[in-house]
Image: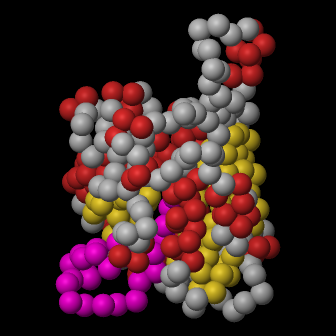
Amino acid sequence: MVTPIRVLHPEKTLLIIVGVGGTGGYVLQQVARLLYALKEQGQKIPSVLLVDGDVVEQKNLLRQYFLPQDLGKKKAEVLAQRYALAYGIDIVAYPEYLDEQRTITDLIASVHTPERPYGRVEPITPVIVGCVDNAPTRKLLHEQVHALRDGVYIDSGNGGVTIPDDPEHISRYQLAKIKATGWDGQVVVGVRRNGQDVMPFPGEVFPSLLEADEGETLPSEQHCGEVVVSQPQRLMTNLMAATSVLMVLHTLLPDGTLLHHRTFFDAHKGFVRSETAIDHVLEVSI
């Protein structure tokens, strides 16, 4: 039996999704349905903030939730409007990349809803879902969430497809290796309460997540044409990553509890393995 641990009060929560491309877009779709169901049951649901400075490109239409008429528009704005209208829930877009000048704390303070109007300050626990594909942004999130008094940070990471240097001339052996890549990933949850880490953060569990490749920078520091994915991800891998995130949120958002700390998956083999949250709680009071 998996023992849940309570980490927040769901009625005092703000859900922040950083990165709404492949995995993030699928997370939003499923979360919108979850929040709509909770609202229909009479439960107070959190507002949702989407953070992403990217624009919709032709290549995104293949595996992301965008249509031809969305081309050239900001991804966060398109999805915020679409799902807010479809499900009648409060979704706000911040259509810029996260950087050192605009922190998570600033974004939390900027969200004003009917339940949290201007001029009124109330305690709120952010649930931050990181669906980013670069180490500099992960490092920034790691540092900024550690500056919060309270927060839950869910990081979704999955492997990309290995692209050869000369894709026009590859052997059968190289082709087999390419087909075997891009299927696996993990979701890790970190928790802070009262200024203390009560569950280790993704970057502490897997330090390599924060190690940037040579020359890799924040998307906000790159020219528009340079913001590219060097290792494209697979549709099924994105879907399984999003489902693994939803496994965390389906108890966290309704009743403030966590069942799992880490989930590992392989979309090709249909493999999922989770480690319970209770086994990873640090020696502090929660």
Q: Which residue is drawn at 68% across and 10% down?
A: 170
Is residue 86 at least partly visible in the picture? no
Q: Which residue is drawn at 72% across and 50% down?
A: 264
Q: Position of residue 87 (x, y in %)?
A: 28, 56
Q: In this view, does 43 lie above or below 227?
A: below
Q: Position of residue 259 (x, y in %)?
A: 67, 68
- Span colored in magenta: 107-130
Q: In this view, does 269 lie above or below 264?
A: above
Q: Which residue is drawn at 53% across and 80% down?
A: 147
Q: Position of residue 237 (x, y in %)?
A: 59, 38
Residue 106: which quarter of the image?
bottom left
Specify whether 253 is left or right of 236.
left
Magenta span includes 15: no
Is residue 222 at least partly visible in the picture? yes
- Placement of the C terminus among the 4 image quadrants: bottom right
Q: Is residue 126 above or below residue 224?
A: below
Report the front residue among 116 and 192: 192
Q: Position of residue 184 (x, y in %)?
A: 69, 40
